[in-house]
Image (spheres, rainbow, N blue to C red):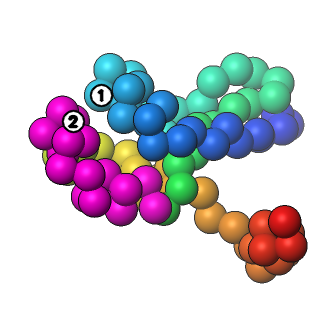
């Protein structure tokens, strides 16, 4: 059984890669360990707040990208949330 490891993409990396490497967040890379790319839930909030990003990356709200992001948002369990809050 392969070990899965997540790589967190910031908003800039996601916006630069997601349209060219679609699907980006629902694919895996490597064999052992297997890597999955993830984004934070606030990535789209940041996109919606910046009009410049909306005009430059107009593909973000297309259906195929919305579906891909649903699978690729980092979700923390309660222990993970506590660890983040302790930092």
Residue 59 appears in the rendering = no
Label for residue 19?
A: 1
* Residue for badge 2: 57
Residue 70 lies, in percent from the top left, at: 41, 57
**Which residue is painted at 36% across and 62% down in the image?**
45
Quadrant including the C terminus: bottom right
Is residue 30 found inside the magenta-colored segment of the image? no
With respect to residue 30, does 81 lie above or below? below
Kindly indicate whether the residue at mark 2 contacts the one at mark 1 (C-beta within 8 angstroms).
yes
For the stretch drawn in magenta, the main secondary structure is: helix
Query: How much space separates mark 1 and mark 2, taking CA atoms?
Result: 9 Å
Is 1 left or right of 47, judged from the image as shown? Answer: right
Magenta residues (range) = 42-58
Eyeballing the image, is 63 above or below 25? below
Between discs 1 and 2, the one toward the N terminus: 1
Q: Quadrant of the N terminus?
A: top right
Verify whether residue 55 appears in magenta.
yes
Nearer to me, 40 or 87: 87
Badge 2 density bin: few <14, some 14–19, many ≥20, Cα 10 Å: some
Q: Quadrant of residue 44?
A: bottom left
- Determine whether the residue tagged by mark 1 lies in a helix, strand or loop: loop
């Amino acid at each position: 059984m392969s070990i899965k490891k997540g790589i967190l993409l910031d908003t800039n990396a996601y916006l630069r890669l997601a349209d060219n490497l679609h699907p980006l967040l629902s694919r895996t890379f490597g064999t052992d360990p297997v890597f999955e790319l993830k984004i934070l839930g606030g990535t789209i909030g940041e996109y919606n707040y910046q009009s410049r990003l909306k005009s430059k990356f107009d593909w973000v709200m297309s259906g195929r990208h919305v579906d891909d992001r649903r699978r690729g948002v980092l979700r923390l369990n309660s222990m993970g949330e506590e660890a983040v809050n302790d930092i």
